[in-house]
Amino acid sequence: MAYKAPRGTRDILPEEAARWFQIESFFRALCARYGFGEIRTPLFEHTELFTRSVGEESDIVSKEMYTFQDRGERSLTLRPEGTAAVVRAYLEHGMVSGPQPVKLFYCGPMFRYDRPQAGRYRQFHQFGLETFGAAGPAADYEIVALTWEFISVSLGITAVDLELNSVGCPSCRPAYRAALLAYMQPRRASFCPDCRRRFTANPLRVLDCKDPGCREAAREAPRIGGSLCPECGGHFAALQELLASSGIPFQINPLLVRGLDYYTRTAFEVVSREAQTQGSLAGGGRYDNLVEQCGGSPTPGVGVALGVERLILAAGGKAAPPREACPVYVAYTGDSLAAQAQALAREIRAWGMPAEAELMGRSLKGQMKFAGRRGYRFVCILGEKEHARGKIIWRDMAGGGQEELAPEELRERLESSRPGSGGV
Ligand code: HAM
């Protein structure tokens, strides 16, 4: 039987993996420039961490988690997102008592039992940032600015919008929630089944539901902007000023509430305008009560996560590195030279050039055909006669020419052919 990767997962083959590596390197470089340190948390956590933080009524917890019992009968869950685990680690390692803010980034797979389609997977990858201990709008600004710089400058993705909203805090949200409930109650029959179910627990979710019935109901609904307390209003205004003064374009979207329950004040997304990409490339916001909810003392936090598969899709060919072609192939004739071929490849690598030697024991004709198909730039041939005279045959696959070289000449030739050497 031929096995296939499980639905919603995929293999990343060498050509694409080079692109992943490049994009991750860009992200890491930018994080270093902004002073974020890397954190790596386990791929699974105690289930309760997610139910408490992301929220029982959220789609993620109610429908999408990969939850299992281990042999010790603990309920564990493959992480559906990174924030909860980073909060857990922040508390577990006492980072709360060190100098604040603590600024962390992560890269890695997340797991959600979602309906797979282009840009939506069951195992997908996120780059994420979390800043703890900074309550002011400058911390939100830094998260949004890094996200924007990464997407628009590092990756050159320009058909995107930055959408911004404030979802208030526990002191102003209840009044808004009550106003929204009163407005929505008579329209409840037109909601999708999900919104009908979660309406009383979380009426705000109707606002960014994609279902046409919910959209229609949300069109004229009261906006949260009018209900923000002076502190939330001031925070939101200051963030907008910071973004405007650094030339980062944004749009206020009063319907943006995000699907995770932990947000307070700032909520934002970077959304693609391209039809073939799943809308949201990145999403995040502030979560000033989450650390306390997870058992710590009150500590503000703000962060974001970016979907790597979606970024790669949206970046198209722009971020593609040149294919890492291995420029030198070492071929040989006669079994007695197999070990010498390996030794020569080793030596060329020690000179700093990628090189490979024949592994299949093919005829010279077969080796040359292979080297042509794989696109090697140069082939060194160890022939029995030439080898006896201390010479190597050098073939430039682009020019077709062939000559005999001594090992020192070979090194010179390879060095002068390096990109930027002014040679071939
Ligand atoms: P999220 O909006 O659930 O937020 O996910 C962030 C990003 O992950 C999305 O914008 C999207 O690009 C990507 N993503 C989500 N689900 C999938 C999927 N099934 N397939 C492919 N990509 C996907 C969070 O996860 C929060 N933890 C973000 C955050 C960090 N908030 C504060 N700090």
Image (cartoon, rainbow, N blue to C red):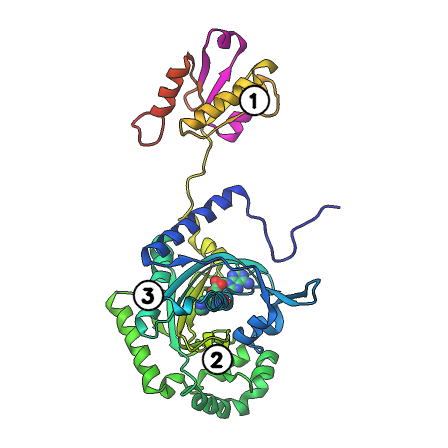
Compared with residue 216, is residue 154 higher up or lower down, i.e. above or below? above
Q: What is the crowding at mark 1: few (fewer than 14 residues within 10 Å), some, or many (at least 20)? A: many
Say if 242 sits above or below 412 in the image: below
Q: Secondary structure at mark 1?
A: helix
Q: Nearer the viewer, residue 346 or 154?
A: 346
Three-letter code for the amino acid on which mark 3 is drawn: Glu
In this figure, which residue is indicated by the disc labeled 1? 367
Secondary structure beneath label 3: helix
Q: Is residue 258 magenta?
A: no
Report the residue that reaches farthest toward the right. Answer: 1
Is residue 269 at least partly visible in the picture?
A: no
Residue interval drawn in magenta:
369-394
Residue in the foreground of this view, choosing between 208 and 286: 286
Q: Which mark is residue 142?
A: 3
Q: In the figure, is residue 395 to the left or right of 42? A: left
- Left or right, 68 with respect to 165, comes to right
Give coordinates of residue 33: x percent, y percent.
32, 55
Residue name at image x 42 percent, y 59 percent:
105
Label 2: few (<14), some (14–19) or many (≥20) C-alpha neighbours in 10 Å:
many
* Callout 3 crowding tier (Cα within 10 Å): few <14, some 14–19, many ≥20: some
What amino acid does circle 1 point to?
A: Gln
What is the secondary structure assignment of the residue under circle 2? helix
**Mark 2 is on which residue type?**
Leu
**Residue wearing tag 2:** 207
